[in-house]
Image (cartoon, rainbow, N blue to C red):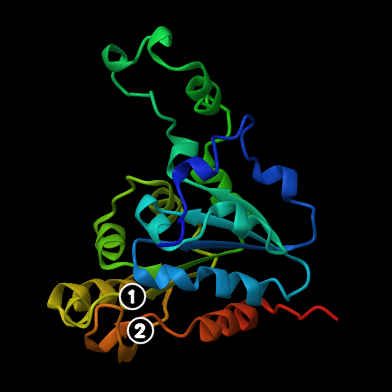
Amino acid sequence: MPPHASPSDIPTPKTAFKASDHASDGKTHILLAATGSVATIKIPLILASLSKYSNISIRLVFTTSSLLFLPPLAELLEISNVDGIHLDHHEWPRGLSSNPAEQPRASDIPAQEDDEETAIWAKIGDPILHIELRRWADILVIAPLSANSLAKIVGGFSDNLLLSVIRAWDTNKPLAVAPAMNTLMWDHPVTTSQIRVLETEWRWFRVLRPVEKILACGDSGSGAMKEWSTIVAWVAEEMGLKLEE
């Protein structure tokens, strides 16, 4: 198998990300995310297509399970207009705990790990990553959205970076999700109920419904993520993007 992405590809930054540092760049800010679905393999294609548009800045948020379906993350950073990748450990560095009794002693943490996993939030007023990403973004697109992450969104969970961004989202900004899962998972009554919540109650969500095709598991039916080119075209129209001249 070819090498895939790892959380260690992007160590915790030494300085916190601040939306205010980018507020006057004149660009459309696109926050693109992926969750633990095989359709995550389409992310490089989505990025390559989006990179052809002018005056945009793309930042990526990946759940840990989505990394299995991505190339080493340095390759994505080489794509034009991709300006950052944000992972769970950037907001919750290893070695931190809400229980002081569980905090490791400094002598128990290897020097290089301590350097790479230093917390960048220390006091009230310091930037909090999921809030800064929400402030920065003009649109959030989650492609693909797995069955598990869909259930967590509707249940109000915020136990990773992406879910925290979603929970803190400004409902005046567009938020699109492209579900991707096995046909029987998509047809399950629980999924039907969850999609109904997004489409009829939480109207700031736009659900880019899946299509019918042969799935990665070999089953045939609905549940495959909407074609990546269609997703890009929707984003371009929604945000009024212009192709590079």
Kind of residue at badge 1:
Ala
Residue at 38% x, 58% y: name it: 68
Viewer-proximal residue among 88 and 150: 88
Q: Secondary structure at mark 2?
A: loop
Percent of width and height locating residue 240 = 69, 79
Q: Residue at x 40, y 53 (%)?
A: 63
Q: Looking at the image, is 94 positioned above or below residue 64?
A: above
**The furthest residue to the front:** 1
| Position of residue 222 in the picture relative to residue 124 (left or right) | left
Q: Position of residue 39 (x, y in %)?
A: 40, 73
Q: Is residue 204 at all visible to an observer of this figure? A: no
Query: What residue is shown with label 1?
Result: 180
Q: Is residue 93 above or below residue 9?
A: above
Q: Amino acid at mark 2?
A: Pro
- The picture quadrant where one finds residue 105 is top left
Residue that protrudes farthest toward the left in the picture: 189
Query: Counting other residues with Cα less than 10 Å from the Cα at mark 1, is it few (<14), some (14-19), or many (20 or more)?
Result: many
134 horizontally vs 93: left or right: right
Return the residue nearer the eye: 141 or 66. 66
Mark 2 vs mark 1: which is more N-terminal? 1
Which residue: 32% across, 91% down?
213
The quarter in which the N terminus is drawn is: bottom left
Give 115 or 30, whichever is nearer the viewer: 115
User: Along the horizontal axis of the image, is 141 left or right of 191?
Assistant: right
Image quarter hosting the C terminus? bottom right
Which residue is tagged 2? 210
Is residue 196 shown above or below 13? below
CB within 8 Å, label 2 to label 1: yes
**x, y percentage for residue 142?**
45, 67
Point 27% across, 12% down: residue: 101
